[in-house]
Amino acid sequence: MSYTIAMAGKGGTGKSTTATLIIRYITQELGKAVLAVDADPNSSLGISLGVDVKGTIADIREDVVEKRVEIPASMSKARYIEYCIEDCIVEESKFDLLTMGRPEGPKCYCYANNILRKYLDKAEQSYPFIVIDTEAGMEHLSRRTTNDVDLLIIAFEATIIGVHTAKRITELIVSLPIKIKEVIYVMCKVPKKGVNEKVEAEISKSGFEISAKLPFDDEIFEHITSGESLLEISKENAVYSEIRNLMDKFVLVSTDK
Ligand SMILES: Nc1ncnc2c1ncn2[C@@H]1O[C@H](COP(=O)(O)OP(=O)(O)OP(=O)(O)O)[C@@H](O)[C@H]1O
Ligand SMILES: [Mg+2]
């Protein structure tokens, strides 16, 4: 069984950055394989991982359900969808990336979703770790087009809006049809001068216990600005060090991997 980590948070907070550094930790420090799932309609995990995305699950759904593409005579519809899923996975030496794409329209995509679900259930056998990058609405988690989650990381910025969004996500979790074993809060892009006292007060009021504070970091900013993979960031990088401590605490302890 895989250990599944999911990122959630408001747009632009630092979810993909955090997910990428977690993938770096698992692949480079633990030497384990990861299935990375980009379940954010904004699809940007591929960019921070430095890989080209060939296609998305949304494209497959559209082709099969809406455009009704011709399926080769030698294949069943289910096998064809599975083949398309395999084809849109980017395979790297230590991780694979599956990109979900845009949210669904009003049509019924249950058939394609069921196959995707079965595919992900099977992936549980092949990857020791699955890392899912999602968004504040957690569309894919709520449609159960992703697996159950061992560790949900709610990323938020040190602003009043950031804390409110984290609170809203916490409330939303209860209604999700998937199991979430543990929820933690990570503050992203923390300014050098520290957290504003009004924001601190809002955090205390909400009762969040912050598991990590990731500083605003110029090296990260430069890497993303120039489109370089965050997997290449230096080992001593301050944000990466925080992620390593966090993962040592939550992942090493709970997985024994
Ligand atoms: N610790 C950090 N220090 C400096 N810049 C950061 C840091 N974390 C993230 N950023 C910057 O913030 C922006 C958003 O980060 P990221 O893409 O990780 O967020 P996201 O939540 O995945 O956003 P989206 O919702 O758009 O996918 C990027 O330009 C990135 O360079
Ligand atoms: Mg992102």
Image (cartoon, rainbow, N blue to C red):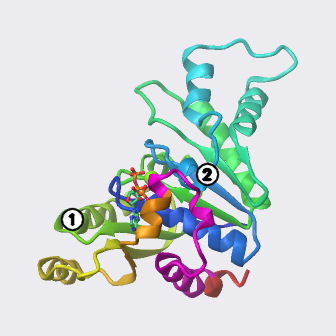
For the point 70% across and 37% down, the residue is: 85
Asked whether the viewer can see residue 177, the reply is: no
Q: Position of residue 253 (x, y in %)?
A: 62, 87
Kind of residue indicated by mark 2: Gly
169 or 144: nearer the viewer: 169
In the rendered view, does 251 fall on the left or right side of 198? Answer: right
- Magenta region, main secondary structure: helix
Is residue 225 shown in magenta? Answer: yes
**Quadrant of the image occupied by residue 74:** top right
Disc sitting over residue 50 in the figure: 2
Viewer-proximal residue, 195 or 184?
195
**Closest to the observer, 72 or 47:** 47
Could you classify mark 1 by the number of other residues whose Cα lies within 10 Å: few (under 14), some (14-19), or many (20 or more)? some
Please report the bounds of the magenta region as a residue range. 224-251
Question: Residue shown at 55%/41% (left/top)?
Answer: 100
Residue named by callout 1: 164
Q: Height in image: 73 above or below 184? A: above
Sequence-first tag of 1 and 2: 2
Placement of 80 over or under 41, stated as above or below: above
Label 1 SS: helix
Q: Is residue 92 above or below residue 41?
A: below
